[in-house]
Image (cartoon, rainbow, N blue to C red):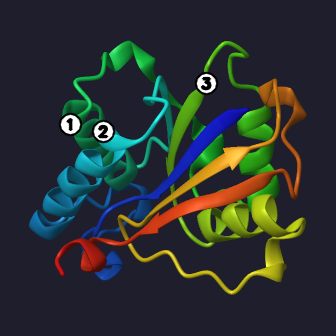
Amino acid sequence: MKTLTIVRHAKAAAPEEYENDFDRPLTPRGFKDAKHMAEVLLKLEPPVDWIISSPAVRAHATAEQLATGLTFAKQNIAWSDAVYLADANTLLTVLSEAPQDIEHIALVGHNPGMEELVAGLCTGAPPHLNLTMPTAALAHLHLEIFWWNQIRWGCGQLQLLVTPKALKK
C-alpha cells in the first residue's frame, strides 16, 4: 500500500496585485497555516519521504515550509512544472511517474485539480464527490497499490481531511 497526502498551497496574495499568477507569494497567514500543516504531516505514518510540488511561488513556499517542519532534505522535493494549475488527470500522471521505492508522497498544488484528484482517487471519477479544499487544506489517503505506476481512479481511501480553520478550534 502507498500513502499520498495532497496539500493545497497556503493562502497567497490577491491575484490582482500581481501581473503574473505564477509569482503570487504567500501571505503571513499562508506561512503560518503551512507551518501548522507541517505539524500534521509530521504525525502521519508512514513518514513522508518525497514531496512533489508546483514551482509557482505560493506552492514552492508551501512545500518548503512543509519540508522545514519535517526536517526534510531539500533534495527530496521534486519541482514539477506539470503540477502548476494541473487538472486531476495530469496530477494522476505525475504521481504515476514517481520513484517506485517511495512510500509516502506529499503533493503540493492548486485547485481545482487537487480537489478533483482526491475525489477521483476516492470515488472512481473526479466529479463524484463534493469536496472542498480551502488554502492549506490537507487530504491524507491510503492507496491500494503496490507501485506508483498502478495508481488509478478509485484506488484511494480518505483517512484524514484537515483545514487550517479546523486546527484553530
Q: Amino acid at mark 2?
A: Leu
Q: Which numbered disc, 2 or 3, marks the residue that appears first in the sequence?
A: 2
Q: CA distance from mark 2 to mark 3?
A: 15 Å
The residue sitting at 30% across, 38% down in the picture is 42
Q: CA distance from mark 3 to mark 1?
A: 19 Å
Q: Secondary structure at mark 2?
A: helix
In this rendering, is residue 124 above or below 16? above
In this rendering, is residue 68 above or below 115? above
The residue sitting at 16% across, 57% down in the picture is 31
State the quadrant of the C terminus: bottom left
Q: Which numbered disc, 2 or 1, marks the residue that appears first in the sequence?
A: 2
Choose top left, top right, bottom left or bottom right for residue 93.
Answer: top right
Q: Position of residue 103 (x, y in %)?
A: 61, 24
- Which residue carries the number 2 mark? 42
- Which residue carries the number 3 mark? 103
- Which residue carries the number 1 mark? 69
Q: CA distance from mark 2 to mark 1?
A: 7 Å
Count of marks placed on residues? 3
Q: Are marks 2 and 1 in contact (CB under 8 Å)?
A: yes
Q: Amino acid at mark 1?
A: Gly
